[in-house]
Amino acid sequence: MSARFADLETRVNRAVVGHLSNAMATVGASLVPVVFDRLYAEQLDGEAAGYVPVILGKDADLAGVVYGDSITIQSQLYSVVAVEPDGTGLTRLRLRI
C-alpha cells in the first residue's frame, strides 16, 4: 500500500510543479521548473521584517543543493540561505541576492 501512495505522491508533486511553476531556475548545470515567490518574514522578535525570495521545486530537481549554492532565476543570481524539504517530495529554498 505504501508504494502506491509514494507513486501517487510523486505524480501529484510533478503535476503541482508542472501547473504552478512560474519560472525556470538554473541549478548546477540543470534548468528546472520552480514556483518563484516572495514570502513575508519577520526577524528579531518582529523588529525587522521584509520579503524573502523563495523557490519551491521537486526534491529530485533540487537534490544536492546546500547553503551557499548559487541559483539563477530570470537572469538574477541568488544565493541559497536555507534548504527546507517538506517531507512530501517538495523542497523550498530561501534565497538572497
Image: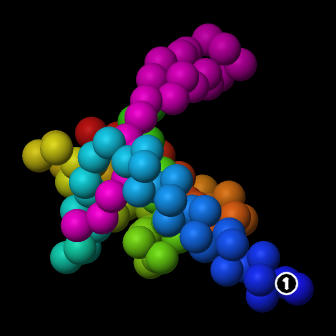
**Residue name at image x 47 percent, y 18 percent:** 50
| Front in this rendered view, residue 52 or 46 | 52
Quadrant of the rendered image containing residue 33: bottom left
Q: Is residue 37 something that shows in the picture?
A: yes
Residue lying farthest to the top in this orientation = 47
**Residue name at image x 77 percent, y 83 percent:** 4
How many dots with numbers? Answer: 1
Kind of residue at badge 1: Ser
| Front in this rendered view, residue 18 or 74 | 18
Q: Which quadrant of the figure contains the N terminus?
A: bottom right
Question: Would you say 69 lies left or right of 4 here?
Answer: left
Q: Is residue 81 something that shows in the picture?
A: no
Question: Would you say 5 lies left or right of 91 here?
Answer: right
Structure colour scheme: rainbow
64 is within the stretch colored magenta: no
- In this rendering, is residue 35 above or below 24? above
State which region is magenta.
Answer: 31-51
- In this rendering, is residue 59 above or below 52? below
Tell me residue 18's x, y (percent).
41, 56
Q: Which quadrant of the figure contains the C terminus?
A: top left
35 is within the stretch colored magenta: yes
**Residue name at image x 68 percent, y 58 percent:** 86
